[in-house]
Amino acid sequence: MSETDSATIRVFLLDDHEIVRRGVAEVVNAQADMEVVGEAGSPAEAVSAVAQCRPDVAVLDVRLGEGNGIAVCREIRSNHPEVACLILTSFDDDQAIIDAAMAGAAGFVLKQIRGNELVESMRKVARGAQLLDAAATRMAMQRLSRNEVGPLAELTDQERRVFELIGAGLSNREIGEELYLAEKTVKNYVTGVLAKLGMARRTEAAALAARIDERKRQHYT
């Protein structure tokens, strides 16, 4: 919040449910030191509205009918780094915590939070506090990794190599060429990998492999 501004904390709300926006707005506007200066029901509306009303804090819902609040957070932080973003969600989601941190969010709170706790969170991020700290993000990454990597322990060394090549986008024929296996043999391996991972489609395994690879790169950079 700029030192040249008054003591009033300017708040922007993004939620695709009008009743939720109205409820949060009532809580915020009841505070002597806060006011809602803008709101939106979609990401497209939010980006242009924030540029016009220039809030101190933007409260963004994660899951929207079109797009999501984390993508909006990323854009707001890129174009208006002075705006603190507070991510609001109905679910305690480790992936959302990680994505929020990567997008530059200052905090991540559940919709079940009490009204007085929510406005206090807004005050804190407006003052520059980071409610979404590195430790919380790291723990979320560890929990998510354990949940995802656990089934991989069931794979044989050869199945793990096939899994990694699926993640690299290789076809069965290309995997066969890489591992010196017949295409039919590779197909059998792929079927076995999907069964052990409890997946129905190859794209699911590819997505999991990509997420694991991305986290490895983030860890070592």
Image: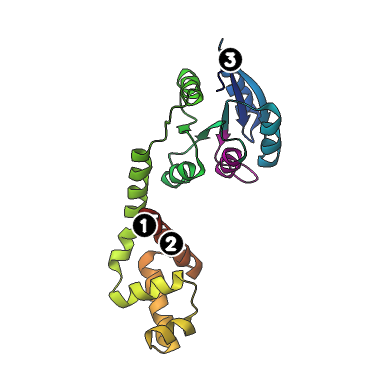
| Residue 144 x, y percent position in the rendering | 37, 50
Q: Residue furthest top?
A: 32
The residue depicted at 43 percent of the width and 31 percent of the height is 130
Residue 148: assigned label? 1
The reply to whether discs 3 and 1 touch (Cβ–Cβ < 8 Å) is no
What residue is pinned by disc 2?
208
The answer to whether marks 3 and 2 mark residues whose Cβ atoms lie closer than 8 Å is no
Front residue (pair 54, 59): 54
Q: Is residue 183 above or below residue 80?
A: below
Q: What's the residue at 63%, 21% (across, down)?
A: 36
Q: Amino acid at mark 3?
A: Thr
Q: Is residue 27 left or right of residue 207?
A: right
- Circle 1 crowding by C-alpha within 10 Å: few under 14, some 14–19, many from 20: some
Q: Quadrant of residue 24?
A: top right
Which quarter of the figure is the N terminus placed in?
A: top right
Q: Are the residues at dot 2 and dot 1 in contact (C-beta closer than 8 Å)?
A: yes
Q: Is residue 215 left or right of residue 80?
A: left
Number of other residues with Cα within 10 Å of mark 2, as a class: few under 14, some 14 to 19, many 20 or more: some
| Residue 115, position as x, y percentages in the image | 50, 20
**Which of these two is toward me, 204 or 56?**
56
Reply yes or no: does residue 66 show up in magenta: yes
State which tag comes first along the sequence, 3 or 2: 3
Q: Is residue 113 above or below residue 177?
A: above
Question: Which portion, as a residue range, is magenta?
Answer: 60-78
In this rendering, the answer to whether 143 lies above or below 155 is above
- Element at label 3: loop
Q: Earlier in the sequence, mark 2 or mark 1?
A: 1
User: Regarding mark 2 in the picture, which secondary structure is present there?
Assistant: helix
Residue underneath mark 3:
8
Q: Quadrant of the C terminus?
A: bottom left
Marks 3 and 2, how far apart in space?
45 Å
Say which amino acid is labelled 2: Leu
